[in-house]
């Protein structure tokens, strides 16, 4: 069985955020760069439910893990 790979747009929709490419780019510009010591899910701009989704997606190595890791990388640059 192959895991489903979600898109960045789908992740933003799941987080309850605007999910079009311009909104995603704006979000990254506004919140980057994250300090190296801070885990993505611990960033202060997430709500509790958003933080939980991000942490669970990585911890469970869920279908969301790849796109969450990609967002993490985007916010570090």
Image (tube, rainbow, N blue to C red):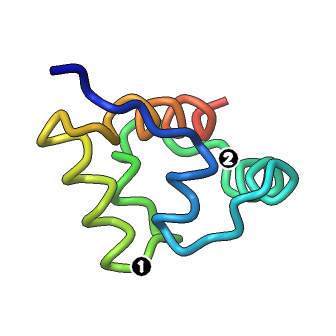
From the viewer's perspective, is 71 left or right of 27?
Answer: left
Q: Which residue is mark 2?
A: 32
Q: Quadrant of residue 8?
A: top right
x and y percent of residue 64 in the render? 34, 41
Above or below, comparing residue 1 to residue 61 in the picture: above
Mark 1–mark 2 CB contact (< 8 Å)? no
- Residue at 46%, 71% in the rendered image: 46
Dot 2 alpha-carbon crowd within 10 angstroms: few under 14, some 14 to 19, many 20 or more: some
- Residue at 34%, 59% in the rendered image: 42
- Which of the two residues, 25 or 8, is positioned nearer the viewer here? 8
- Which of the two residues, 50 or 5, is positioned nearer the viewer here? 5
x and y percent of residue 72 in the render? 49, 37
x and y percent of residue 4 in the render? 34, 32
Mark 1 vs 2, N-terminal side: 2
Q: Which residue is mark 1?
A: 47
- Which of the two residues, 1 or 75, is positioned nearer the viewer here? 1
- In the current view of this chain or complex, which residue is farthest to the front? 1
Mark 1 falls on what kind of element? loop
Above or below, comparing residue 22 to residue 18 in the picture: above
Q: Which mark is residue 76?
A: none
Q: Nearer the viewer, mark 1 or mark 2?
A: 1
Disc 1 from disc 2: Cα separation:
17 Å
- Which of the two residues, 47 or 13, is positioned nearer the viewer here? 13
Q: Quadrant of the N terminus?
A: top left
Q: Quadrant of the C terminus?
A: top right
- Residue at 74%, 52% in the rendered image: 24
Mark 2 falls on what kind of element? loop
From the viewer's perspective, is 76 left or right of 46?
Answer: right
């Amino acid at each position: 069985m192959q895991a489903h790979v979600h898109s960045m747009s789908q992740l933003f929709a799941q987080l309850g955020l605007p999910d079009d490419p311009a909104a995603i780019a704006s979000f990254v510009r506004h919140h980057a760069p994250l300090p190296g010591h801070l885990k993505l899910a611990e960033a202060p701009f997430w709500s509790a439910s958003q933080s939980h989704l991000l942490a669970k997606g990585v911890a469970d190595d869920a279908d969301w893990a790849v796109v969450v890791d990609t967002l993490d990388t985007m916010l570090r640059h």
